[in-house]
């Protein structure tokens, strides 16, 4: 069975949610100020909502519709969530995230978002990653700009502001800059959301990826594999 990779950065671990996280999710996401910054969060956050949301993640992953991660401080508590929702027909993804209010203004969202961009381009091999935020939520806009996204044109008064970033053709999956990915032997790079046959891997394995324009030693100009769904 395919397993979802864990991602680590300098200060964070991004891991799959478990039902043990439900109470923590309810406490963080149920904050009215967090709700005010999110594009798709319920309020009030009632009993059972967190459990149902967490239970849906595995199906989303196995049906190749996306991947959801818990944002955690290293060796410490859960502080938020981040996800990529996939559009296989266009080979692109939508980035979304939220973080508990007490953890705002510390750079955690930017750090987690950079890891997900690296994962989306370097492992899932998406051609484009987009995101949006509620108009007036300038902090989320700054996060998206820091990870390299550009704002798309929108009419005045638009409730959501859209951003996007295209893949770099020289994106390296071998030379990281502060982001580490780990997977089990039956889940090598490119297989997270794909049923295609992959080269045999001996594991567990650790790979590193970066979203820089530099080309790694021996890296081919064209990626050997692409996530395509006919």
Image (tube, rainbow, N blue to C red):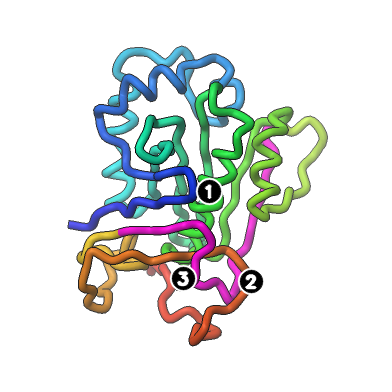
Residue 177 colored in magenta in the image: yes
Q: What numbered label is drawn on residue 94?
A: 1
- Locate residue 27 relative to residue 40 in the image: left or right: left
In the rendered image, the vertical position of residue 178 relative to residue 214, given as above or below: above
Q: Quadrant of the N terminus?
A: bottom left
For mark 1, does the 10 Å Cα neighbourhood hold few (<14), some (14 to 19), or many (20 or more) residues?
some
Q: Residue at x 55, y 46 (%)?
A: 111
In the rendered image, the vertical position of residue 61 relative to residue 99, given as above or below: below
Question: How many marks on residues?
Answer: 3
Element carrying mark 1: strand
Residue 62 colored in magenta in the image: no
Q: Earlier in the sequence, mark 1 or mark 3?
A: 1
x and y percentages locating residue 16 in the rendered image: 32, 42
Q: Earlier in the sequence, mark 2 or mark 1?
A: 1
Q: CA distance from mark 2 to mark 1?
A: 21 Å
Q: Residue at x 53, y 55 (%)?
A: 117
- Locate residue 155 relative to residue 39 in the image: left or right: right
- Where does label 2 land, which residue? 213
Boundaries of the magenta span: 159-182
- Where does label 3 land, which residue? 173
For mark 3, does the 10 Å Cα neighbourhood hold few (<14), some (14 to 19), or many (20 or more) residues?
many
From the image, state whether disc 2 or disc 1 is nearer to you: 2
In the rendered image, the vertical position of residue 178 relative to residue 153, given as above or below: below
Q: Disc 2 vs disc 1: Cβ atoms closer than 8 Å?
A: no
Q: Residue at x 70, y 48 (%)?
A: 145
Q: CA distance from mark 2 to mark 3?
A: 12 Å
For mark 2, does the 10 Å Cα neighbourhood hold few (<14), some (14 to 19), or many (20 or more) residues?
few
**The quarter of the displayed image where residue 101 is located:** top right
Element carrying mark 2: loop
């Amino acid at each position: 069975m395919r397993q979802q990779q864990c991602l680590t950065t300098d200060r964070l671990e991004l891991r799959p949610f478990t039902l043990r996280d439900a109470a923590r999710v309810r406490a963080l996401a149920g904050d009215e100020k967090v709700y005010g910054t999110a594009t798709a969060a319920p309020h009030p956050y009632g009993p059972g909502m967190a459990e149902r949301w967490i239970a849906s993640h595995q199906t989303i992953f196995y049906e190749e519709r996306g991947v959801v991660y818990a944002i955690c401080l290293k060796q410490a508590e859960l502080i938020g969530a981040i996800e990529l929702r996939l559009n296989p027909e266009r080979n692109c993804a939508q980035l979304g995230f939220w973080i508990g209010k007490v953890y705002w203004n510390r750079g955690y969202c930017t750090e987690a978002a950079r890891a997900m961009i690296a994962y989306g381009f370097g492992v899932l091999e998406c051609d484009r990653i987009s995101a949006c935020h509620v108009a007036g939520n300038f902090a989320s806009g700054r996060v998206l700009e820091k990870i390299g996204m550009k704002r798309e044109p929108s009419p005045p008064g638009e409730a959501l502001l859209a951003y996007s970033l295209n893949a770099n053709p020289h994106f390296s999956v071998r030379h990281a800059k502060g982001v580490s990915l780990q997977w089990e032997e039956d889940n090598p790079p490119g297989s997270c959301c794909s049923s295609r046959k992959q080269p045999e891997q001996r594991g567990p394995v650790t790979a590193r990826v970066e979203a820089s324009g530099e080309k790694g030693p021996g890296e081919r100009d064209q990626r050997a594999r692409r996530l395509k769904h006919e």
